[in-house]
Amino acid sequence: MTDRLTLEVHNLDVDVLTGIYSQETHLPQPLRISITAELAHHDHYKPGTPLSASKNYMDLREAATELPRGVHFTLVEAVADHIIDRVMAGDDRVMRVTVKIIKLAIAEAGESIGITLVRSRK
C-alpha cells in the first residue's frame, strides 16, 4: 500500500496584476486562490516526525502570496502556472498540484468565476 499526503491551503485573497481588458491592466485585481498539493510518501508519521518528512504548507501559501512584483499576468492561468511551478520546484515528493483561482471583481451575484489548473509529475 502506498499512502499519499494532501496539503491544502484554501481561500487566500491576493491582489494580482492580471487581466486583458483596459480597466483590468493598470490596477491589481482581487483573486481568491486555493492550492492542493499531493505528496507521495512511504513512512508512517510518528509523534516526533520532523517537518522535513513532509512539506511545509506555508510553502503553498507563499507561492500564492509572494508573486513577482510589477509582473502583469495577462491570464489567471499564468498565475496558476507560476504557483504550481513554485510548489513543485525542488521537491520530487510533490506528485500533483491543483490551483483554483476565482476572480472576485467580476462576480455580480456571488457566483464563483475562475479556473482550476492541475499538473501531475510525469
Image (tube, rainbow, N blue to C red):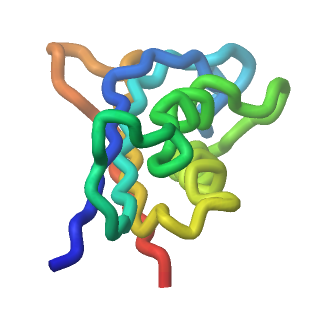
Q: Quadrant of residue 8?
A: top left
State how many labels appear. Answer: 0
Residue 22 in the image, given as x and y percentages of width and height: 66, 27
Residue 9 in the image, given as x and y percentages of width and height: 36, 31
In the picture, measured across the screen, residue 115 lies left or right of residue 19, that is left
In front of the other: 94 or 17? 94
Q: Residue at x 49, y 39 (%)?
A: 50
Residue 29 in the image, given as x and y percentages of width and height: 55, 19
Q: In which quarter of the image is the N terminus?
A: bottom left
Q: Residue at x 46, y 24 (%)?
A: 31
In front of the other: 65 or 16? 65
**Which residue ends up furthest to the right in the rendered image?**
70
In the picture, measured across the screen, residue 113 lies left or right of residue 117, that is left
Q: Residue at x 65, y 44 (%)?
A: 74
Residue 91 in the image, given as x and y percentages of width and height: 60, 61
Q: Quadrant of residue 66?
A: top right
Q: Residue at x 69, y 61 (%)?
A: 90
In the picture, measured across the screen, residue 104 lies left or right of residue 113, that is right
Q: In which quarter of the image is residue 97?
A: bottom left
**Which residue ends up furthest to the bottom in the rendered image?**
122
